[in-house]
Amino acid sequence: MQFNVNHPILFVIVGALILAVLAQSVYFLVRALRRAKQLGIGEKVVKKTISSAAVFTIAPAIAILVGVVALSKSLGVALPWLRLSVIGSITYETVAAGNTLNAANISAGDVITDRSIYVTVLWVMTVGIAAGLILVPFVTKKIQGGMMNVSVKDKKWGEIFNNAMFLGMISAFLGYVFCDVSSVFKGETFGLVPVLVMAVSALIMAACGLLAGKLKARWLTDYALPMSLIGGMALAIPITNWLG
C-alpha cells in the first residue's frame, strides 16, 4: 500500500491524542472552578479570568495555525497538527522538520512519499522537544536558584545574565537565518531571502509595539507575534520572486 501523509488512520491517532489532552484541560478547569468556590472567589472574577485567558490564547493559536499550514504541504496535516498542539513550538518544529527534509534531499513543499522519512521527521520533531520535559524537573530549580542568587547579590549582573540567556536562545535561530548569506559572494541571492523576511517580521513587530504604546491598545502586543509571522510569510513570496 502506498504511503499517504494524509491517511485517515493518522487523523484517528492524532485525534485520539488531542482529545486526551483536551480532556485533561477540562478536568483541571473543573477542579479550578471548584477550588475557586471553596476559596470564596466571586463568580464575576472567575468569569473575567476565564474570558481574559481565552482571548489571550487566540493570538498564539493563530501563530500555531500558520505553522501547521506551512508544514502541511510536505508532512500532511496530521503530524503538524499533533506536534504543534501537544508541547509544540513553531520556532523549533519548522526548523527541525526543515533540517530533516534537507538531510533526506527533499525540497520544502515536496510531499513525503517514503514512510521511513516520515517517521524520521516525526522522531526528530518529537525527541528534540521532549528533552525539555526531561530536563525541567531536574535542572530548573537549580538554574532558577542560581539566577536569583546572582540577582540578590548584584541586580545589574542579574539582568545581564537573564538577557544573555535569552540572546543565546535567539542566536540559535539566527544562525539558521544567516547560514546561506555567503551565497551572495558567489553571485546568488537566495541566501538573502530569510534575512529580508526576518527584517520585515521585525519591523512589523516593532510597529505593533510602538502603536500599542501610543494608542494604549494592549491587544496589539498580544497579536504582534501572529501579525509579524503572517506578514513575513506573505511578503516572503514577492521577496523570493524579486531575488529570483
Image (cartoon, rainbow, N blue to C red):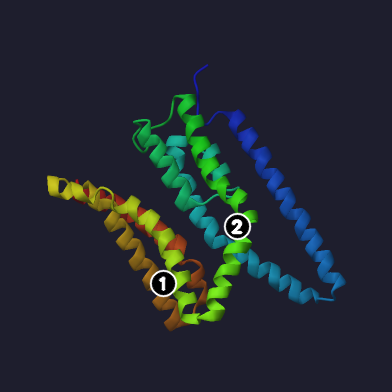
For numbered disc 1, what is the local secondary structure? helix
Residue 155 in the image: above or below residue 74: below
Residue at (64, 66) in percent of width and height: 53
Which residue is disc 1 drawn over? 208
Residue at (80, 77) in percent of width and height: 42
**N-terminal-most mark, 2 or 1:** 2
Asked where in the image residue 166 lies, by quadrant, the reply is: bottom left
Which residue is disc 2 drawn over? 139
Residue 76 appearing in the image: no
Asked where in the image residue 41 lies, by quadrant, the reply is: bottom right
Q: Residue 103, position in %: x, y?
A: 37, 34
Residue at (84, 74) in percent of width and height: 39
With 156 as the anchor, is 86 left or right in this view? right
Q: Are marks 2 and 1 in contact (CB under 8 Å)?
A: no
Residue 88 in the image: above or below residue 55: above
Q: Disc 1 residue type? A: Cys
Residue 243 in the image: above or below residue 142: above
Asked where in the image residue 210 lies, by quadrant, the reply is: bottom left
Badge 2, how many Cα within 10 Å: few under 14, some, many 20+? few
Q: Disc 2 residue type? A: Val
Residue 141 in the image: above or below residue 187: below
Badge 1, how many Cα within 10 Å: few under 14, some, many 20+? many
With 206 as the anchor, is 38 left or right in this view? right
